[in-house]
Image (spheres, rainbow, N blue to C red):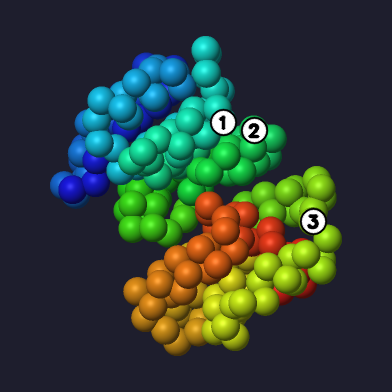
Amino acid sequence: MIRTMVVDDDALVRLGLTDLLDSDEAVEVVAQATDGLHAIEQAMAHRIDVALVDVRMPRMDGIAATRRLRALPHPPKVITLTTFDLDEYVYDALAAGADGFLLKDTDPAEILRAVHLVAAGSAMLHPTAARRLIDRYHRSGRPQAAQAQTRIAPLTPRERDVLSLLAEGETNADIAKTLGMQESTVKSHVSRILNTLAVTNRVQAALLARDAGLAP
């Protein structure tokens, strides 16, 4: 059972997401929160596997909340919710440790798929949106190429293949299909890549890949 929390200051949005998540027999909504501070309190009171967090909220916004949630002793995975895929706050939320983002008008089936993917350790970044996010990061203070190449140097050739596709926004399932691997093997490679690069999520790994020249 995937234990989830819905964080949004709009009561109707919370209700809609809760109803959707509860329709999945493998997902349980164990907490709701009206803003970032409330989300921290709820996460400390309940074991949360995945939190769906709105970006714009009073008192504490979704960016600060994501950073605080990910710093907890037992941090939940975080999916950021936003109205606009170009919202600059989304970029900051991913840098704070979010595992992906969704538009609020995303197809319900895709929202449920995102929860399952993130709970399993993957990320939910639409390929096109991921490229735009990475490009935005890339333009705003990228590290020197030599430094990035040094950081990826310990990776095996296969891990570099995986990282290159990850940098293009591919999911674990996409990478497995492209490279002719089992999805569980890809998941293991991604975990080792994140540990080796000392980054907290796939977006940050993708940035290093771009700076090191592994992806256009």
Q: Looking at the image, is mark 2 or mark 3 nearer the viewer?
A: 3
Which of pointers 2 and 3 lies earlier in the amino acid sequence? 2
Q: Is residue 78 above or below residue 151?
A: above
Q: Is residue 22 left or right of residue 65?
A: left
Q: Which residue is at 52% across, 18% downward? A: 60
Instruction: Give the spatial CA distance, label 2 vs label 1.
Output: 7 Å
Q: Which residue is at 83% across, 60% downward? A: 144
Instruction: Give the spatial CA distance, label 3 vs label 1.
Output: 23 Å
Residue indicated by mark 1:
63
Residue type highlighted by circle 3: Pro
Q: Residues within 10 Å of mark 1 (few under 14, many from 20)?
A: many
Q: Would you say residue 193 is visible in this rendering? A: yes
The front one of 123 and 21 is 123
Give SS at disc 3.
Answer: loop
Q: Is residue 65 above or below residue 38?
A: below
| Disc number placed over residue 89 in the picture, else none | 2
Total number of numbered discs in the rendering: 3
Residue type highlighted by circle 1: Ile
Q: Position of residue 196 (x, y in %)?
A: 55, 67
Give SS at disc 1.
Answer: helix
Q: Is residue 110 above or below residue 16?
A: below
The front one of 96 and 12 is 96
The front one of 113 and 158 is 158
| Disc number placed over residue 143 in the picture, else none | 3
Which of pointers 3 and 1 lies earlier in the amino acid sequence? 1
Give SS at disc 2.
Answer: helix
